[in-house]
């Protein structure tokens, strides 16, 4: 286990890699318990995950015409409900 932890007891790059490559909930219990209580190791693990994925791509907003279509359909539904209620009330 010495190769997975340094002199301070924190995870080495090999230890972080072992935790990262383990299936969820299947990391070695000693490594997982240390990781749960060590903010430094948590930061290193998260920073490594972000570095592997790269920067996030900005999501494009939906086109403006889609808003217009939704607005138009909403108005049509409101008008048809009002016409239907008017016919029922006038009957």
Image (cartoon, rainbow, N blue to C red):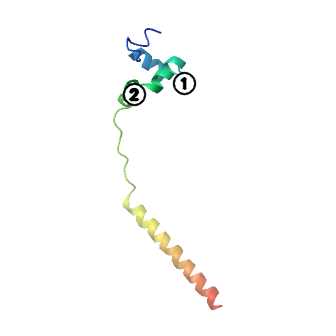
Question: Against 75, is 34 above or below?
Answer: above
The answer to whether residue 85 is left or right of residue 40 is right
**Does dot 2 land on a helix, a strand or a loop?**
helix
Alpha-carbon neighbours of circle 1 within 10 Å: few (<14), some, or many (≥20)? few
Residue 55 image offset from top left, x and y in percent? 33, 36
The answer to whether residue 39 is left or right of residue 89 is left
User: Residue at 43% across / 9% down in the picture?
Assistant: 3
User: Residue at 39% across / 15% down in the picture?
Assistant: 12
Question: Against 83, is 40 above or below?
Answer: above
Residue 6 image offset from top left, x and y in percent? 39, 12
Is residue 42 among the parts visible in the rendering?
Answer: yes
Q: Earlier in the sequence, mark 1 or mark 2?
A: 1
Check whether the beta carbons of the residues at disc 1 and disc 2 lie within 8 A of each other.
no
In-front residue for pair 11/13: 11
Question: Against 43, is 89 above or below?
Answer: below
Numbered disc in front, either 1 or 2:
2
Marker disc for residue 34: none
Residue 13 image offset from top left, x and y in percent? 39, 17
Quadrant housing the C terminus: bottom right
Q: Which residue is mark 2?
A: 39
The answer to whether residue 65 is left or right of residue 80 is left
Alpha-carbon neighbours of circle 2 within 10 Å: few (<14), some, or many (≥20)? few
Is residue 28 among the parts visible in the rendering?
Answer: no
Residue 18 image offset from top left, x and y in percent? 47, 18
Q: Which residue is mark 1?
A: 23
User: Residue at 47% across / 26% down in the picture?
Assistant: 36
Outermost residue, right direction? 91
């Amino acid at each position: 286990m010495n190769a997975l932890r340094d002199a301070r007891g924190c995870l080495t790059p090999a230890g972080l890699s072992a935790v990262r490559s383990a299936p969820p909930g299947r990391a070695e219990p000693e490594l997982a318990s240390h990781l749960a209580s060590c903010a430094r190791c948590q930061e290193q693990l998260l920073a490594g995950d972000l570095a592997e994925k790269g920067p996030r791509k900005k999501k494009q907003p939906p086109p403006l015409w889609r808003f217009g279509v939704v607005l138009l359909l909403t108005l049509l539904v409101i008008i048809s409900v009002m016409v239907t209620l008017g016919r029922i009330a006038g009957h």
